[in-house]
Amino acid sequence: MLQTQEPTAAPGGTGGGPEVEALHFHRCAWCRSAAERSRTLCRVCGSSEMDEERSEGSGAISWTTRVVRTQDLVHRIRQTCFVALDEGFTVPATVEAQAIEPLPTGTRVRLAGLGPDEKAAVFVPA
Ligand SMILES: [Zn+2]
């Protein structure tokens, strides 16, 4: 097991709102390219020196893989897709929305929370 858990002792800067789990990513120490946190090598220059940074959690749907509708979610959709964060990296995501049709590519979304095991972060329309 990798010990990646950090103490969440960030001094409150968001004005007292409930703390939303943050999405972290890697930024290359050499060329400043952003990469998914799971990456250990920069895909641009191959450096292994990666700084961990915290994403603002805003991005846009880059592509959708599937939409799940159930009897319980008639007017809600749960869309499995990838979200391209403004920092320049992409994460697998689940977008939950009050909608019937899938949200189109390019829809602005914001982070609502991290799913179990951080496999797919949960986003909602921004
Ligand atoms: Zn690099």
Image (tube, grey):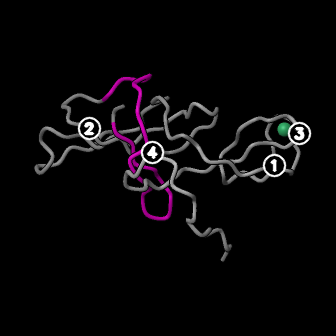
In this view, the residue farthest toward the bottom is 1
Q: Look at the numbered discs 4 and 3 and tell me whether their residues touch, using CB distance below 8 Å.
A: no
Please state which of the two labelled residues, at mark 3 or mark 1, is closer to the viewer.
3
Regarding ligand 1, which quadrant of the image does it lie in? Answer: top right
Please state which of the two labelled residues, at mark 3 or mark 2, is closer to the viewer.
3
Q: Residue at x 39, y 42 (%)?
A: 123
**Classed neighbour count for the residue bearing mark 3: other residues with Cα under 10 Å, few (<14), some (14–19), many (≥20):** some
Give the distance between the C-alpha atoms of the residues marked 4 and 1, in whole angstroms. 22 Å
- First of labels 4, 3 by sequence position: 3
Q: Residue at x 55, y 34 (%)?
A: 85
Q: Which residue is mark 1?
A: 41
Residue 11 occupies quadrant: bottom right
Give the distance between the C-alpha atoms of the residues marked 4 and 3, in whole angstroms. 28 Å
- Taking the image as shown, residue 107 lies to the left or right of residue 97, namely right
Q: Which residues are magenta?
A: 103-124
| Secondary structure found at label 1 | loop
Residue 102 occupies quadrant: top left
